[in-house]
């Protein structure tokens, strides 16, 4: 077995294991001090990696506002506070967008109002959103939802004018490579396309075994009856000592 992913959270590990097993790849979880390690057969590593990449797994770790602004006993400058706020706001939005059906991953780049130079007009807020999705994904329905969500979450982007400053870029996720589908037939784990052939073969072997057992039983019975009949006939032909005298 080869390591596929290390230092995973339990939820991410379970999601990956379920996905790989659905695609016919057996994955095992190994719990370590640093997190969970996933192992697969070495031959399955390339396909497992492609399947995970297509599904956007493991998901990027996102920090919320509470985590980013956790007090650590140090005084932050206004610039540091601004950068941390933009970063936290972006990650909060990314997490929310990933809750949409069929969204694999999302990135949000936020620009808050800022005066570039003294005397210059304030640069208005804007946002750029990138969404990777899998089919079926209704663009006509989801783009307005994404735009409204982002515009309502960022200061200075409310209203029709604000929504016009939110750009949404969609990209389809690459299709996961088709793998071998497996089925369980009795004690055997085989490819789905070979299942019917194996079932016919097993059925034929069972019938042949039953026929062989019946033949052996019939032969044993007939042989016993034949032996008894021959013994009776020979006993009738050979005179006893009493008859001879």
Image (tube, rainbow, N blue to C red):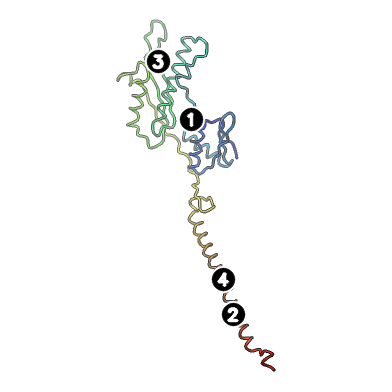
Q: Percent position (x, y) of residue 214? A: 54, 69
Q: Percent position (x, y) of residue 26? A: 54, 42
Q: Quadrant of the C terminus?
A: bottom right
What residue is disc 4 on? 217
What residue is disc 1 on? 59
Q: How far apart are marks 2 and 3 (CA)?
A: 104 Å
Disc 2 to disc 3: CB gap under 8 Å: no
Q: Distance between the residues labelled 1 and 2?
A: 79 Å
Taking the image as shown, residue 95 lies to the left or right of residue 238, namely left
Crowding near the residue tagged with mark 2, few <14, some 14–19, many ≥20 C-alpha atoms within 10 Å = few
Q: How far apart are marks 4 and 2 (CA)?
A: 14 Å
Disc 1 to disc 2: CB gap under 8 Å: no
Q: Percent position (x, y) of residue 68? A: 48, 18
Of the pair 228 and 63, the residue shown nearer to us: 228
Residue farthest bottom in this picture: 245
What residue is disc 3 on? 112
Q: Residue at the spot x=50%, y=46% of the render?
A: 180
Q: Which of marks 2 and 3 is in front?
A: 2
């Amino acid at each position: 077995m080869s390591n596929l992913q290390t230092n995973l959270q339990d939820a991410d590990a379970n999601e990956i294991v379920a996905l790989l097993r659905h695609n016919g790849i057996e994955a095992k979880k190994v719990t370590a001090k640093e997190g969970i390690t996933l192992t697969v057969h070495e031959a399955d590593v390339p396909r497992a990696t492609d399947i995970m990449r297509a599904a956007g797994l493991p998901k990027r770790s996102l920090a919320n506002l509470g985590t980013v602004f956790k007090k650590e006993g140090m005084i932050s400058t206004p610039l540091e506070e601004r950068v941390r706020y933009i970063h936290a706001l972006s990650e909060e939005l990314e997490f929310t967008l990933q809750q949409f059906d069929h969204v694999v991953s999302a990135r949000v780049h936020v620009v808050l109002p800022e005066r570039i130079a003294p005397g210059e007009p304030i640069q208005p807020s804007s946002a750029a959103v990138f969404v990777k999705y899998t089919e079926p994904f209704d663009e006509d329905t989801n783009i307005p939802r994404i735009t409204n969500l982002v515009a309502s979450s960022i200061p200075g982007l409310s209203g029709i004018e604000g929504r016009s400053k939110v750009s949404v870029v969609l990209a389809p996720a690459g299709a996961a490579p088709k793998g071998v589908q497996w089925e369980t037939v009795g004690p055997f784990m085989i490819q789905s396309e070979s299942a019917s052939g194996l079932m016919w073969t097993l059925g034929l072997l069972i019938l042949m075994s039953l026929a062989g057992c019946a033949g052996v039983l019939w032969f044993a019975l007939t042989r016993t009856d034949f032996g008894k009949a021959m013994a009776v006939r020979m006993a009738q032909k050979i005179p006893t000592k009493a008859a001879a005298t």
